[in-house]
Image: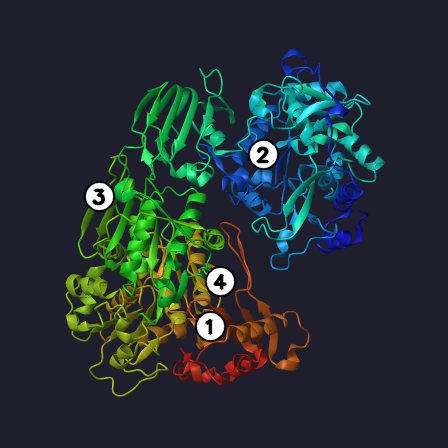
Amino acid sequence: MPGNFAPFEEKMRADGLGDAAVAAFSAAYGALTSGATGMIPEADLTPASGVPKLDDVTAKPVDAALLGKTVVLKLNGGLGTSMGLDYAKSLLKVKGADTFLDLTAKQIMAMRAELNTKVRFVLMNSFATSADTMAFFKENYPVLYADPDLEFVQNKVPKISRDDFTPALWPAKPSVEWCPPGHGDLYAALLGSGKLDSLLAQGCKYLFVSNSDNLGATLDTKLLSYFAASGAPFMMECCERTANDKKGGHLAVRAKDGQLVLREAAQCPDADEAAFQDVSKHRYFNTNNLWIDLEALKALMAATGGIVPLPMIKNKKTVDPKDDASTPVFQLETAMGAAIECFKGASAIVVPRTRFAPVKKCNDLLLLRSDAYACVGSVPVLAEGVPAAPQIDLDSKKYKLVQQLEARLVGGAAPSLKKCTKLTVKGDVRLSSKNVFVGACTVKNESGEPKTLPPGTYENTTVDLTAAPGLGPLKVTSLKTAPIAGQKPGTSGLRKKTAVFVDGLYLHNFVQATFDALKATGADLECQTLLVGGDGRYYNDKAINVITKIALANGVRRVWVAKDGLASTPAVSALIREGGPVWKKVFGAFILTASHNPGGPNEDFGIKYNCENGGPAPEKLTDLIYKNTTSISEIKICDGAPDVDCAKLGETVVRSRDGSCQASVEVVDGVAAHLDLLETVFDLGAIKALLDRPDFSICFDAMHGVTGPYAKSLFVEKLGQPASCLLNAVPKDDFGGHHADPNLTYAVDLTKKMGVDRLGQPVGAAAGLPAFGAASDGDGDRNMVLGTQFFVTPSDSLAVLAAHADCIPFFAAQGGIKAVARSMPTSGAVDLVAKAKNLALFETPTGWKFFGNLMELKSPFLCGEESFGTGADHVREKDGLWAALAWLSVLADANAASNTFVGVGDVVKEHWRAYGRDLYCRHDYEEVESAGAEEMMARLSGLVGSKGLADLDPDLEAVSSFAYVDPLDKSETSNQGMILEFAGGGRVVFRLSGTGSAGATVRVYVERPVAEPTEADLDLVASEALSDLADRGKSVAQLHEFVGREGPSVIT
């Protein structure tokens, strides 16, 4: 039927597709609507014959000039979905630690170095592979990444409704309305992207194209020389067909004009199938390794309206490939090899089978990973003594996906196939590097559970494992699941109401998604250790068992669980960095905490993952975890593994029934390693001398969180203080019904003890009050510091510690701190110290993970956040106990040569006199409606660059959105808060916080510097002095109107 292309062009233009893409699709659509079937009948062909062989031709040696005109192009648009991948297939590890792209990049780099010539390298990515691929090159091959010609992106085309030949619509999932146009899009994408003209302008003439998963397709200099000398505009590399190739496309000659053509299986009429599959008749298949004269390509496209007139291939599908009931559609594609019929004088050459080594199935992958192949110059070749590649036939149901293959390789290594001719595996069989196959071997298992082939050499034999022992407690069970919305981890992990985590497979999904992400990024799960601990809140005990059993099913063979499940967040970081011998190195940890949020069955639960450096997972990993949660379908778990008894220190070894593997689950001391580390950081002798003074006493409030046992061990057992110095030191799963957040609002037991009110102002008489008070939160990473009737803001705390850092041995022994950092909302008090002491200063987004990278650049390092977090590079987390000991070190130093006692307030006021005072406070609006909060932030975003700010407030000078570029990995983080700058240095910052489990929390940070404070300025109440500035900032933002509140939940 006649078609109307206009709606297709309109749709393509609206999505940014250019002239070349539109023209190419228009040609294919025209062929479809004209009644063309795309079929090539046998009667129209004669077999190709007399094709020269590479082994028989001669060619001159190449020189630098010829290589300088040559471009290597890899087709890199595939995701490998047929093998279970959802990322660029070329990023799959194929030999050792090398991916397809590693091997290709190394080949290009080696050739450039050997011949001292810039062989150009280009990728045709797809929209699905571009980001992952370019990130890979940026990180691993920056020289190649820096080339502006490294990539161009192939086009996409609309699917066509079979009923009326109009653009298929599927509003429920608009992305499925599009499909890739096949690798024949190479020509349109080259032209449309400008890459063709760019390469020609640079003097390039010869293009070698191949699939990125074909490791045999290297830039062969003999082929290059032969092609250049031949003068042909186009040359196809072919191999001789065997019975295994009968279903693939073949080379032929068009009978009417003698032109070489390519016929794909989809272009063969059913009646001609026998002839199509006759490998003695049609002897050659296309390897998809092509050589193209770029000048000839440009001339052809100029002569044919900007297209290469490729034959159309029509595929019948449904618009949603996962829904057979969705709209029936045509998907049109073209094959790039079919261009052989478009070039007069096109040629073909028969190459050795070694130039066609694609990885299409797990059969291919297992073979390539085995010892049957070796890498020579980053090119996989048959190992010495292997005459031909063995034939591999793995069970198509058990080994279809990469994940299935890797789960069935014990130790992650392939069996020996060097002397094997054929390996057949039927059923669920686990293989290892200790299996050596010789000749033709078959291994089968007809039972319903996995069976492991024992170590040994198997020669020309069939092994039946059906009745063999299984894995017993280490048997992996697959739980079917589906994505659960809202599992995107924030800067501090994933936090929700406890009931959400307890319900169904919510926790299971997130944990499995994390393991999937770790495996994708190359973490060594089998040979290293997983750590699990938490703050002891409700559901911790059950969650520990879920995580442990999922870990074992995902190949983890050593798990450390903190005693009683208790490990503070900084202690977890210390255990990762310091715990155990090298062979027990911790690769990462799950921390079960919602930090300072309330705990209990009706309150909050949380989980976060810390990586091998002890710090929070970087954004790259958390993004991948979240991506996995949106597509997860299966959870692996060892249901038969015993539960962990967290109350008893010691190791439990879990062994499989067949003896093929075992796992260790060890309950470890979560307290000792952290305290041992802190003992190396501080002079505990000097601190004890301070604590033992008759005019000094201490009070530490653990708020019924995880820090209680640490504080008892440190202050009572190590430093000899009475147990009465501790408040709320027994961990409780609901934190005693309180909000374990160390601030003036919630740490009421401590503020009462220290004689201050909710605003930090003195209450009552000072006599008999402790000289020093500190509190930490549920997971032990936050802190609040008080003196007698004196509250220290976190911003001032950071600045004071920076000014006095030399009194801490950890810093002094390394020549003093080299750098300080603060989160953007934190006041600029520490900036003044950094300027005076010539220290490097960094301003980061909120989230401790941003400090972690900086610690790799500068050491020793001090950092902090206004949200009661302070720390150094002894670990990669903020550390409540560290902050308390740091302050005690400052006080010990201040009192060492003083006849009168110098208290916390004295130290802070002297600091203000020396550096100036930054008045600062924070207003929190908790659990407001997210929609209103986001509308308010959008309003502020709209004011960036506005020339009408003075109309909103006469003193408002600028509005900006905070963005950050990490100096180590160059990652970019944007939209991290809105900053309102007022005359005189005043600043009001608005930020949405992700640390709650319900609704949104709007945080408003208010700051005004006092450069040369008077004695009266030293006694100002910050919240009162800043109230007018706070009101003006909120008025500009229209905060109260948007969130429906008249005032904040908390002022600190």
Mark identifier at residue 212: 2
Using the numbered discs, state the Cα–Cα distance from disc 2 to disc 4 in whole angstroms. Answer: 38 Å
The part of the image, by quadrant, that contains residue 232 is top right
Q: Which mark is residue 653?
A: 3
Q: Residues within 10 Å of mark 1 (few under 14, many from 20)?
A: some
| Residue identifier under label 4 | 845
- The residue under label 1 is 999
Verify CB contact (< 8 Å) between mark 4 and mark 3: no
How far across and down, in percent of the image, does residue 336 sit? Answer: 69, 33
Point 53% across, 44% down: residue: 87
Residue at the far right in the pictured view: 303
Q: Is residue 681 or residue 375 the one in the foreground?
A: 375
Judge depth for marks 4 and 3 and give the one in front. Answer: 3
In what element is the residue under mark 2? loop
Helix, strand or loop for disc 4: loop
In primary-sequence order, the first of circles 4 and 3 is 3
Instruction: State which quarter of the image contains the C terminus.
Output: bottom left
Sequence-first tag of 1 and 4: 4
Distance between the alpha carbons at the discs numbered 3 and 1: 44 Å
Above or below 384: residue 976: below
Measured as percent of width and height from the top left, residue 1015 is found at 40, 82
Callouts 3 and 1 close, C-beta under 8 Å: no
Image side of residue 371 versus residue 181, left or right: left
| Residue 79 appears in the rendering | yes
Is the residue marked by circle 4 packed among few (<14), some (14-19), or many (20+) residues within 10 Å?
Answer: many
Q: Which amino acid type corresponds to the residue marked 3 in the rendered image? A: Val
Q: Earlier in the sequence, mark 1 or mark 2?
A: 2
Q: Earlier in the sequence, mark 3 or mark 2?
A: 2
Q: Nearer the viewer, residue 363 or 242?
A: 242
- Kind of residue at disc 2: Ser
